[in-house]
Amino acid sequence: MIDCGLFQGDKELRLRNWNPLPVPPSSIQWLVLTHAHLDHVGYIPRLVKDGYHGKILATSATVDLAKLTLPDSGHLQEEDAAYANKIRSTKHSPALPLYTMEEAVKSLESFQAIDDSKSTDLSSHFSLRFFGAGHILGARSIEVTIRENGSTCTVLFSGDLGRYHQLIIREPSVPEAADYLLCESTYGDRLHPQDDYQARLAKIVETTASRGGSVVIPAFAIGRTQELLYVFRELIEQGEMHSVPVHVDSPMAIDVTDIYRRHHEDDNLDTAILESHGGKPFSPPNVHFDRTVQESKALNNLNIPSIIISASGMATGGRVLHHLAQRLPDHRNTILFVGFQGAGTRGRAIQSGAKFVKIYGTQVPIRAQIESIENLSGHADYGEILTWLGRRIKTAPRQTFITHGEPGPAQALREKITQQLKWNARVPAYLEKVTL
Ligand SMILES: [Zn+2]
């Protein structure tokens, strides 16, 4: 099994988390992970609870990150169930969490970091090779080699693909060939703008500060927060931006930043920069890491222009909701989106120009300036995906399956791959079975 994530976004998708798996968890022998985002690992505690007892293999950075994300996810599941019971908004009484924090912690015992610099034999039939995916720390594409009845077949799982020319993480790499390919398509219908996003970022902060407002950035705790901290430090040090206070209001993002400081195996950073900052490239001059609830609440009284980076990245939960509820109604503030906003999320609604958004049961008016910077995305656009595919794979895979995208982007990428690379590509249906 490659990846074991939670469905996120629309309710119809989220309800799928409650469907039984198409195979009994106890029948699965190995689980291998591309990276630690919840849409790739968030179902693991339930899988273990329901009878999976094999190892869970991943890079050491992914293991470290999952140690943070899974217990936190269990905690959120418990909170959501408790809230549903309190307001009796559920037909199931009582509402139950998909898994608890305790069950999430227990599932971590099955994790095992592997040396991804060489091929790993799982058995005489299966072996694995990992390729840097450039998406977040520890992210890999996975090539599975299957040997059976004297013949060999390779299946390449792209995982989530990152961008080329990034600040922190090395760009994605790819093997020379694959018999079958599963390729993500998050941005399958879009190209990221080529503009100087750092200058735009500085301008957004300066303009907002000049009218006495603050910039609230809903940011994914893994990856985007660290990149923002890195860029703000550079902009301030180079005199491109005033040294406004930067608050990181997310215990998860703070812990993840520590992991980024510890793991250097995926680094694309200039080591001279690292050293001149005492190994702290993620600390702008006026940075505050607000870990406690008291520190977070104190931000409500912050009257000087500031930058508040807080999770979750699509404003579906977490501390950022408090900041949005407080700062959305004031036209002086700016809400800045720096990552993909899934359909059905609050983030997508705000980004799409809604006049009100519901937070904690209240309709909050949206008067703040709304901005989006796509260049900071952790996902390759279709041009970069085609580069990734075409750069080294010279022979068309027998079949390419387009996954991990909403229907529009998935079909758009399928057409691009069919037309430009002349490969056989299609979008599989949910729960479809394919014989290789
Ligand atoms: Zn991801």
Image: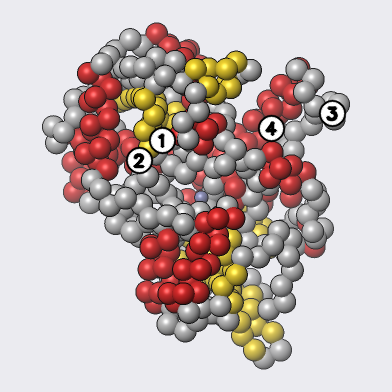
First in sequence: mark 3 or mark 4? Answer: 4
**Mark positioned earlier in the residue sequence (3 or 1):** 3
* Tag 1–tag 2 contact (CB < 8 Å): yes
Who comes first in sequence, dot 1 or dot 2?
Answer: 1
**Label for residue 424?**
none
The colour style of the image is secondary structure
Q: Is residue 401 visible?
A: yes
Query: In the rendered image of this protein, does residue 415 appear above or below residue 96?
Result: below
Q: Where residue 431 sits in the image (x, y, percent)? A: 74, 60
Q: Position of residue 66 (x, y in %)?
A: 56, 45
Q: Name the residue that disc number 2 marks.
A: 373
* Left or right of 23 on screen, residue 71: left
Q: Amino acid at mark 1?
A: Phe
Residue type highlighted by circle 3: Lys
Q: Spatial distance from mark 4 to mark 1, Cα to Cα?
A: 25 Å
Q: Secondary structure at mark 1?
A: strand
Q: Earlier in the sequence, mark 3 or mark 2?
A: 3
Q: CA distance from mark 3 to mark 1?
A: 34 Å
Residue labelled with disc 3: 91
Name above or below for residue 436 compared with residue 137.
below
